[in-house]
Structures are given as C-alpha cells and as structure tokens.
Amino acid sequence: MALIAETDIFTLCAILFGLSWFGFWADSHRLGQKTSGALWVILGGVLLSNFHVTPFSAGAYAFIMEYMVPLAIPLLLFKADLRKIFRESGAVMVTFLVASFGTVAAAIIGLYVIDLGEVGPQIAGVFASGYIGGTMNFVAVAQAVEIEPGLFSVAIGANSVVSVMALMLLLAIPSISLIRRWLPSAIMDNADPCANTDQGAESNSDLKLTHIVGALSLSFLICAVSSQLATALSIAQYAILFVTGFAVVAANSAPKLFERLEGEFDIGMLIMYLFFAAIGLSTNVTEFIASALHLFFYSLSLVTLHFLLVLSLAKLLKFDLAEALVGSAAALVGPGPTAALASSRGWKTLVMPGIMCGVFGYVIANFIGVSMTRFLS
C-alpha cells in the first residue's frame, strides 16, 4: 500500500510537477548537463513508487500518457519546416530501419542465448513487435499468436521495465565521452545549449499568453479532429499519425506565422518531462523481478544486441550519433518518448522525423511480429 493514494490527485500532481521541476533544474546545472535531467526525473519516479511513497497506477499518470503526450506533439512541431527537416535530418528513417533490423536480428539471436522453450518463437515475435512499434503492437501480436494470459502478463512486465532502462540508456549515451569519440555527432556539437538548459526554469523565451493560449487551443483542436477522424475510420490506435500530420500541415501552411510564435516549445517540453515522471512512477521493479527473470534477461539481451548493432552500423555507415539514437528510440520506445529525447537534448530538427519513424513502426510492427513467430515456428 502506497503512502499516497491513487485518488489523491493534487498530491500526485505536485509530485509529477516537482519531478519535472527537478529535471529542468538539473538541466541547468552540471548534474543534468552530464546525464540529462530527464534521466533523473525517471529515476526519481522509480524510487518514489518502488519505496511505496506513490502508487504504480493512477488516473493522473494515465491522463498524461493518453492525452497530454498527443497534445505536446503539435507544440513541438509548429516550427517544423519540412524542407529544412528533410534537408538536415533525412537519415533518421534510414537509422530507424537499421534499428528495426537490429531488433529483429537481436530477437532471433536472443533465442539461442536464452532457452525459452516452446514459447520462444511467440516471445520473439511479440518482443520484436514491441521494440519496433510499441505497447499497442505488443498486445496485438500477443493476441494474434495466442500467448496464454499468464505468460502475457509476465512478458509485458518485462517489456515495460526494460523499455524504461532502454530509455534511460538513450538519454545517457550522449554524455558518454567514449561513445562520443568513437561515433561523432555534428548535431550534438552544434545543438543550442538553450534548447537543453534554458528550456526549463531558466528559459529565455518570452512566455506571451496570447501565443501560448493560441498554440494550446490549436493543439487541442488538432488532437480532437485527429481522434474523431481515427475513430471514424476504425483506426483509433493510429490517432497520433493524424495529430502529427495535421500539425505538420499547419506548420508548413504558414511557416512565417509559426516562426514568430513564442513559448509553445517550452510548454511541449514541460509535458514531455511530466511524461518521463509518469513513466518512472509507473515502473514496478520489485513485482517484475519476483515474477520471471528469464524474460527480463531475454528482453535485456534483445535491447543490448539492438544497441550494439545500431551503433556498429552507424559507425560503419558514418551516421550522426544523434540520428542513430533518434532512429533507435523510435523503434524501442515509440514516437512520444522519442520526441522527448530529441527535444530534451536540443535536437529540434530531429523531433518530427523521430515521431514519424515511431508512427511508421506502429504500422509495420504487427506484420513483422506475426511473421517472425511463424518463421521461427
């Protein structure tokens, strides 16, 4: 039993915003500049929930994950000039495809490293789909290959914990000097420090209410239209695709108008840090470790091999490290966290490509997961 009840919305929101504040504060000091404030937001959430201060599930977390993250996407994309993005960041899709290939290869190799028995092909297909698309694909493929409920519960627990670990590693890699020397990054070298340290409490942008309220209104409208359209077409799970599309259309229909907009990116960043806090607070480490370590180690080996293949191929093909990480993130953790990763590091030109690659992962992951299970069987 947690000290704070899941119905205590005000206290939970105070913690969510407090963790986000700490992340922004860390970003403006050496602590966050070396590791990223988002990493400390996640760790803080994990500690609070696993020491039973906060609950593992609450309506506040679900609201952020389901509603606030889509709202943040247009705010982060209103300055997305497609011509500039394609010119400067076109390799992200290639890195995403490399990352997806690495995930498939790692899922197959992992079966030879860890014996999962007769359910091995099913597990490989389900985990591959989850680490190319997302949780939606994980669930869909599990149903398609008919994984029994008990095994599914343990598997999705492994997926959740290792996904958080993968996200933390993605956030930490840019601060590892050995990797930076081995795989250089012009994008990281040229990133505006203000995009990381000043997007929080030290922000230099003028927070004009007319701009912010207008941007939020348009973002809500885009999310509403996207949700209704996706539901009408019976593809509600792909609503984020419409959100992204409409945001990009708006941004490119009036680029000069949106270029003058101020403060919207800061609000998008705040929402993303709230998302990181909710992810950390939702991670039940102790319950998972007690259930099935073999799936944890399989999932961990998959992600480890994924990173090794992605970084090695990025070195071989001379990809920018930032592009490689965004492509990897789009496969491993999906469009929302990928946008947060890119924006928190100041890689603004990679936000939209990362989101689009993550959505593309939603589209292809089910086919890949089911095909893998059939092939390995």
Image: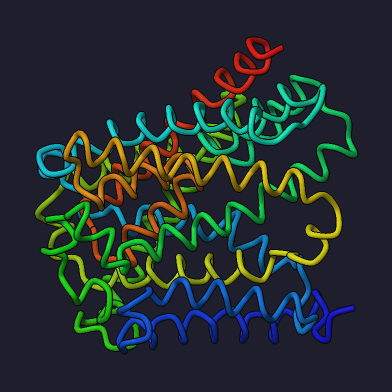
Query: Looking at the image, which is closer to me, 45 or 113?
Result: 113
Query: Looking at the image, which is closer to me, 325 or 263?
Result: 325
Q: Quadrant of residue 195?
A: bottom left
Total tally of numbered discs in the picture? 0
Query: Looking at the image, which is closer to me, 374 or 117?
Result: 117
Against 263, residue 30 (above or below) is below
Q: What x and y, as percent, mark residue 30?
A: 31, 87
How is colour applied across the structure in the image?
A: rainbow
Give the quarter of the figure containing the C terminus. top right
- Residue 224: in sight, yes or no? no
Against 323, residue 285 (above or below) is below
Q: What x and y, as percent, mark residue 193?
A: 18, 75
Q: Residue at x 29, y 66 (%)?
A: 345
Q: Classify residue 26 as left or right of residue 255.
A: right
Give the quarter of the figure containing the N terminus. bottom right
- Residue 269: in sight, yes or no? yes
Query: Looking at the image, which is closer to me, 77 or 197?
Result: 197
Q: Residue at x 49, y 27 (%)?
A: 105
Q: Residue at x 58, y 58 (%)?
A: 164
Q: What x and y, as percent, mark residue 276?
A: 52, 67
Q: Quadrant of residue 111?
A: top right
Q: What x and y, as percent, mark residue 84?
A: 10, 44
Q: Quadrant of residue 63?
A: bottom right
Q: Classify residue 62 as left or right of residue 217.
A: right
